[in-house]
Amino acid sequence: MPKQHRAQLTRRAILTAAATEFDRVGYEAAALNAILRRSGTTKGAFYFHFSSKEAVAEALVAVYAAGLAELRREWLERDRDPLSTAVGLTVEVARRLEQDVVLRAGLLLACRRVGAVADGWDGLIDRLLHESAEADQLRPGADPAAVARVAYAALVGTHTVGSDFAALPERVAETWQVLLAGVAREGALRPERTGRS
């Protein structure tokens, strides 16, 4: 196995182990020895890739930000209306957070401001809801800026109110269902085109 490939595997093993420990006991309580044991690496291998536990946390935030950016790009390039894009993208992100401990740890660490990365959800939701209003998907009188602020607050709340990420996709879909019942035009959202592509 080439040296560079082996180094990438080791780095990934450390990130996954750290994410799992952070997910299990929290960032502060996660011990370096537990991360080393879980990753199957030595201290020397760890310090070859990362200078500290905080450096691992910053790398996890960067992985989350890059994964989120890629997912957004994919959804924005699809031929979908803006309201279906907003719902489908957020449900898919919730599904990935539920299933991928590395992304989940990156999000939680980003929320703690480790690495100081803004994920831009508020701006994206605002943009998509303004585009929804322009596409006549919102009811007359619905203020897209207000709808975006409420949607963003509700979506942030879905992941902070729940005790874990196990049912996050369902909670995100439910949040949109309740919110859009009051502001979307009848038939504006095509359920068959949201969620999975």
Image (cartoon, helix red, strand yellow):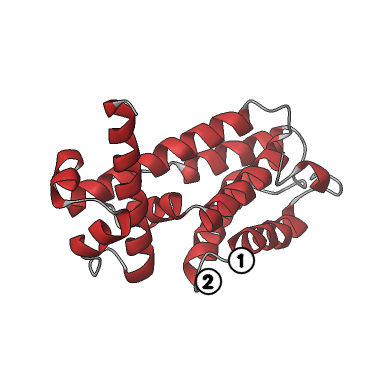
Residue plotted at (86% across, 49% down): 186
- Answer left or right for 184 relative to 149: right
Q: Nearer the viewer, residue 27 or 153?
A: 27
Say left or right for 28 vs 146.
Answer: left
Q: Which residue is more in the foreground, 113 or 32?
A: 32
Residue 146 visible within the image: no
Q: Residues within 10 Å of mark 1 (few under 14, many from 20)?
A: some
Give the quadrant of residue 118.
top left
Marks 2/1 in contact by CB < 8 Å: the verdict is yes
Q: Is residue 4 above or below residue 21?
A: above
Does residue 36 sit above or below 63 in this rendering? below
* Image location (x, y in percent) of residue 168: 58, 62
The residue to which callout 1 is attached is: 167
> Which quadrant holds residue 174?
bottom right
The quarter of the displayed image where residue 73 is located? top right
Task: Please give the label number shown on residue 1.
Answer: none
Q: Position of residue 166 (x, y in %)?
A: 57, 66
Q: Give the residue at mark 2.
A: 162
The quadrant in which the N terminus is found is top left
Quarter occupied by the C terminus? top right
SS class of the residue under badge 1? Answer: loop
- Number of residues whose C-alpha sits closer than 10 Å to that of mark 2, classed few (under 14), some (14–19) or many (20 or more): few
Which one is earlier in the sequence, the residue at label 2 or at label 1?
Answer: 2
Amino acid at dot 1: Ala
